[in-house]
Image (cartoon, helix red, strand yellow):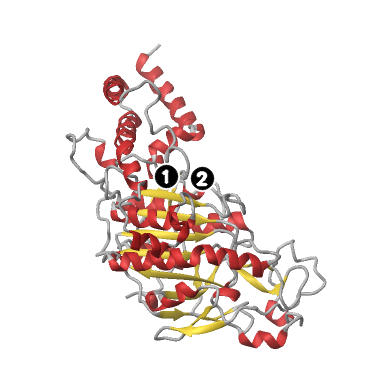
Amino acid sequence: MNPLRESELIETRRHFFGRTAGGIGSAALASLLNPGLFAGQPAPGTVVAGPGLNGLPHYAPKAKRVIYLFMSGAPSQLDMWDYKPKMADWYDKDLPDSVRNGQRITTMTSGQKRFPIAPSIFKFKQFGKQGAWVSELLPHTAKMVDDLAVIKTVNTEAINHDPAITYIQTGSQIPGRPSTGAWLSYGLGSMNENLPAFMVLHSTVNGGFGGQALYARLWGSGFLSTRHQGVSLRSTGDPVLFLSNPKGMSESMRRKMLDRLASLNRQRFSEVGDPEIQARISQYEMAYRMQTSVPELTDISDESEKTLEMYGPDVKKPGTFAANCLLARRMAERGVRFTQVFIRQWDQHGNLPNDIRRQCGIIDQPCAALVNDLKQRGMLEDTLVIWGGEFGRTIYCQGGLSKTNYGRDHHPRCYTKWMTGGGIKPGIVYGQTDDFSYNVTENPVHIHDLNATILHCLGVDHERLTFKYQGRDFRLTDVHGQVVKPILA
């Protein structure tokens, strides 16, 4: 038997099983990998940011980093941003067939005999130089509306949560594609060798998560190297699993263990030439460095009382949305390229008024604080902040309707997101919807357009950031997408 051929076959099998059924721990550590370390380890104390692809960014970026505040479950644009005063006269009247125009609806309301109009019970006022309409639910956000570009015409084809969130995060309703943060890690690289390029925070609501489940593939790397996968921080215990030394192992002992393990891995690399072995060496080294960098990141004792008060009373409670917004700012300061903050429980099919009051009470002050905090530190000009969910909510009621209570079903044809910071024109409202907030009447923005615009702000041409897989070139925007130039600064 030819020993070289046998080695090749072993490595082929190892690659197959390793890439399709790798453990969660190895995938998480792989996402910490700094690509600049493949050639060997730097001297202790040396900070070397990981490079991205040659030739990127394609042009001078306005933003260096992204903070994406994702409202999982689909907040109601009708009760927060898309003011429709004429609907007061339509209370409990049926949605005209000419408005719906045969649009597909979910099975949760498709069996209803009627589609009665449910006007928002919340008051709206105009704020800012442009007179943007903002609901009473968002008093803190309303005060900073001159910093925002409010986009009222975002739309998608997906009508259920999981495919819709997968779609906006990865550019495809079918799981398996890289997420936005993974694409940016792949294309632009890391700005800090001691922290991942892509980090994910999950926010608690009333002590738990609830709502639609969120799967790791939403911040996954798909067919890209697993080193580009987002690293999810935990709110209790070790922020990253297996980061602390095991009981009985000192720091010096761990250092000796890693050095010996690296020696064995280099020996194996010299035998088979597998680049994943070099990657493994770097993964262990990144985890070792994170033993210092992550605790420092999550320790907010150095924040001033004025700053903490700005984020609200929940900021000192780990895992809350307020605490995560503050952590997102600290990550931005330390060079994390893409930070995703999730908060669930926006899926309000019934009892919407009470539930949306609670949710807005949780997110309103921290969102405004994050933007103002970045602005005060001179960071907003090169930090892109995005707020919004996967689709919107219907004007017609799901279930029982009264003057004080109603629910709303999923609505993909138009909904509201806002953006601010690096590369975005402040103080504008973009796009218009019809009187029912059902159809776009002016300036539609598909989610592919939104993702193309995000990449553009970071100096990336969405048509040129590609990866060849299974015989074709893939990209975040698939074969679609136009940069929304009117919202650019």
Mark 2 Cα shell of 10 Å, populated few (<14), some (14-19), many (≥20):
some
For the point 25% across and 55% down, the residue is 55
For the point 61% across and 51% down, the residue is 210
Q: Mark 2: which secondary structure?
A: helix
Q: Is residue 230 above or below residue 390?
A: above
Mark 1 Cα shell of 10 Å, populated few (<14), some (14-19), many (≥20):
many
> Where does the C terminus fall, quadrant-wise?
bottom left
The x and y percentages for residue 413 are 60, 71
The kind of residue on which mark 2 rests is Ala
The x and y percentages for residue 194 are 28, 42
For the point 26% across and 36% down, the residue is 38
Q: Is residue 315 above or below residue 412?
A: above
Q: Are marks 2 and 1 in contact (CB under 8 Å)?
A: yes
Dot label at residue 229:
1
Label 2 sits on residue: 216
Q: How many marks?
A: 2
- Please say whether residue 409 is visible from this viewpoint: no
